[in-house]
Each structure stands twice: as structure tokens, then as C-alpha cells.
Amino acid sequence: MLGVLAAGALAMSAGPLSAQETVRIGSEGAYPPFNFIDSDGNLAGFDIDIANALCDAAGFECEFVVQDWDGIIPGLLARRYDAIIASMSITEERKQVVDFTDKYYATPAKFVKAEDRELEIPEDIEEANEVLSGMSVGVQRATIHENFLRDNFPDIDISVYASQDEANLDLANGRVDLVMADSVVLLEGFLETEEGAGYHFVGPDYFEEEWHGEGIGIAIRKGEDDLREAFNNAIQQIREEGTYQEINAKYFDFDVYGE
Amino acid sequence: MNLSLVINSLPQLLSGLLITLEITALALAIGLALAVPLALMRLSKNFLVRAPVYGFIFYFRGTPLLVQLFLVYYGSGQFRPELEALGLWTFFREAYFCAVFTLTLNTAAYTAEILRGAIQAVPYGEIEAARAMGMSRSLLYRRIILPKAFRIALPAYSNEVVFLFQATSLVSIITLLDLTGVARVLVARTFAVYELYIAAGLIYLACTYLILWIFRRVEQRLFAHLRRPEAEKAKKLTGAALP
């Protein structure tokens, strides 16, 4: 079976990418506003709009595949789809198994707590770990935020969830004291919704390159350089043509691309 | 295959196994204790006693365990003020309690159904004989029907134990770090999907085999009177004759 896979990989990387080639894109659909399932049951969100714009720019025919987060890299490796456009951070750990395009956005991570709860989180991470010692923090499984918490906050009690929605639900239920995720995800997917009333950000912005990486990129299988280059060029193109800024403005009133 | 990774992960996997074994044992013990009265109520001639138990069993056998777990864990959150008023929220707040609670009710329903079948399979002649001896109803159940029913139910119950043991792997989705939960955390970190899930699978396999072995020994003891001594002896003789 490995032989077949290897042969398939060779065939895939050998052929140059022609226009109108079908590229299957894996996304999660549970990370609003970046990717979510809309009322019609279709994938929607910033990632999906960007993916469509990139496919237009690169001349690909794109198909979307919905995949749960903790199986999203295995699904790519198993060739269920050819690229992951699902707000995946570019990290050293993931680079061991997949290749990434350049970033297409970058936002910091933050904690959220209930407003009526007294808590100050100091700027310094070690001090913050002491302050938060023994508290429970909800985080989505297999994310950079989980890794960041495990490595920097050894004294907190980490609860891992299949999706960010479930972590937010348990914050609202009072099972966890805090949740941590990408600031924009928390803002748009929770704080600005009805369920998020009475909750707010606490503590500093976290963006440590070792954990939070170089921003959010598109993951593809290793060695498929033609596809990676095609996406890199497409990212450049939509930023120059202003399509990116249009999509940005549709979702956020600030620039999510970062520096 | 990254073997050193598996060996390095073993302590964590085994700590997960401990949680798996704990919730399996708790759910089985409480579930079995509940199943006996439930089976008897299920067989009651009184409709008002029989109907609610029938409904309970029907629900827990008719819906997926995953749905039951979600219902108890996230559903209880919706009734937090009411549960707090009753003083029950301290329990439902804990994923561990929610997992044991759901698994207990699930296994109680299945076990009650197994026991009901076994009670009905007790030969009528034995019951008649006991009645002829003048045994009261409770004595009849205690001395004749239940001991016989347990023996009849044992093979089916061993399946239920194995099923429940493996079903505990679902609790990782409500944040518990059981064997599967630990494997998932490690996979998320290392992407060594095959290595870690094969290791976790082998640990489950070994435990399942152990459970089946224990049940086989118990069955051998309980059914000793049904074995034909001559056949046993013949087997031993031929066995000894072989080089």
C-alpha cells in the first residue's frame, strides 16, 4: 500500500499544474468567522472566501471537503484533499509533516473570562502561570493554543475540546474558568454573539513565534512545490488586486494580515 | 514506525488506561447493581412498574452512546440554575461524573435486558419444584431463579463488559483524558498517527483479552457440574500421550 501511495505522490508532483485542474480543499467549518457552516449547510467564512479568491486567481477548479480539526492533517496526508485552508498556523511541529505557503493572515491569541470574575493576568508569562495556577482553561484540541498552554502554563488544568464552540459552551456553563484561542475567533465567534454577553478578553496579546508561528498559511503535502508556488503567487495577486482587502473588509474592521 | 516515541509515551498512555479502567469498573459495578431490580421491575405484572423501566431501557438501547454523552454533558449545562438549586451541579460540572453517570445508565439498561432474558429462560420445572417445597416468592428468587439466571446470563454479560470497556473510548470527547484521550493529545503533538493508535489499540486488545480470560475461568467454575468427566479424562490422556 505504501508503494501505491509513493507512486501516487510521484505522479502528482511530476505533472505541472495546468489551468482548470481540480484542487480539493479541506476545511473545518467550526471556527467562525474564519470557517463555519452557514444556514444552508455550506462552508462559509473568511477562509472560504480567501480560498475561492485564490482558486480564481490561480485558475483552479476548487472543491471543499469538511474535516474535523484533529484529523485535518492526517486527512491531507491520506489524500482526501490537496490543501488545508482552515486558519492553520504555520509551526515548526507541523512543518515536519506538511509544507506551508506564505501566511495569508496573522492575529494574536488571548484569554477570555466572565466579566463578573475578578482576575488580572500579568504581562509576564511565568507570573501569569502562577496567578492562573489550578484554574481550568478550555482550548481546542490539536491547536497551537493547546501547545502554547501546555508548554508555558504547566500549573493550569487544561480541558481539550473537539471544537472551539464546545470550549466556549463549557466556559458559559462554568466548567472552565477561561478559554484561550485566536483573538479574532473569540471576538467574532463568541464575544460578539448573544452567548458571549458577559464575557471579555483578559490579559495580554500572545504572539510567540515558537508556538504561534509565522501566521496562518495553507498546508499542502510535502514536495508538492508547484501547488505551493501557485498558492503563493495567488496570495500576492489577490493582495495586489485588492480582492484580499475586500474580503477583509467584509468580515473585520481592522487589517488581519498583520505586518 | 517510531518505536522510541511509543516507549516514551507509555507512561502517559498507561495513566490514561487507569482512567479507562476506573470508569469501566465504576460503571459496571453500579450498573449491575441497578440492573437486577430493573430486570425484576421490567418483568412485573403491574403496568405502572413495568412501563417506566421499559421506557428507560428502550431509550438507552435505542440511542447512540455518543448522543447520550453529549446530552448529559452539554445538556446538563443548559439546566445549570435548576441543578444548582438542587445541589447537583457540583457533580454534573465534572466530566468524570458525567462519563460514569452516562456509562452506568447505558450498561444498566443493557444488563437489565440480558437479565430479563435469563430470568425468563430459567426452566419452569425448577420453579415448580421450589413452589412444591413451599418456598416463598422472595426465597424462590433468592435461592432458585436469580442464581440460575446469573449463570445463564454470564456469556452475554461478558460481551456487555467488553462492549462497555471499549465504549469508554468515547469519553475523550467530553475532555476526559482516558487512554484514547491521551493518544489523541499525543497524536496532535507528534502527528505519529499509526504508532500511537496502534499502541493504544494493543493496550485495549490486551485488556479485552484479560477480561475474556477472567470470564472463561468464572464460567469454567460455574459450569463445572455440566462438564462430562470422561471426556475431560480422555482429553488429558491423549494430551499426555503426545510428545
Image (cartoon, helix red, strand yellow):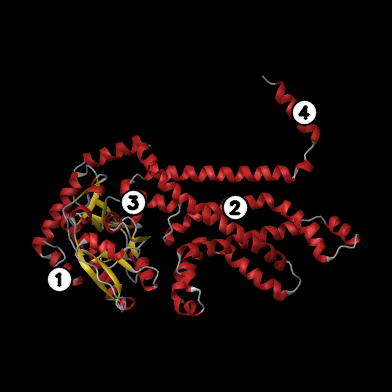
Q: Vertical placement of A197 versus A203: above or below?
A: below
Chain for disc number 3 = B
Label 1: which secondary element: loop
- Specify the label residue B188 is tagged with: 3
Q: Residue at x 32, y 68 (%)?
A: A178
Of the residues under marks 2 and 4, which one precedes in the sequence? 2
Label 3: which secondary element: helix
Q: Quadrant of the C terminus of chain B?
A: top right
CA–CA distance in space, label 1 to label 3: 32 Å
Q: Residue furthest top?
A: B243
Q: Is residue B1 visible?
A: no
How far across and how far down the image is residue B63, in percent? Answer: 54, 64
Mark 1–mark 3 CB contact (< 8 Å): no
Residue where numbered disc 4 is placed: B234
| Residue nearest the viewer, comparing A96 with A227 | A96
Q: Quadrant of the N terminus of chain B?
A: top left
Q: Residues within 10 Å of mark 1 (few under 14, many from 20)?
A: few
Residue where numbered disc 2 is placed: B161
Q: Amino acid at mark 2?
A: Val
- Specify the label residue A254 is tagged with: 1
CA–CA distance in space, label 2 to label 3: 30 Å
Say left or right for B127 vs B32. Answer: right
Between label 4 and label 1, give the one nearer the viewer. 4
Say left or right for B61 vs B195. Answer: right
How far across and how far down the image is residue B233, in percent? Answer: 77, 30
Chain for disc number 1 = A
Q: Amino acid at mark 3?
A: Ala
Q: Residues within 10 Å of mark 2 (few under 14, many from 20)?
A: many
CA–CA distance in space, label 1 to label 2: 56 Å
Where on the picture, by quarter, is residue B38?
bottom right
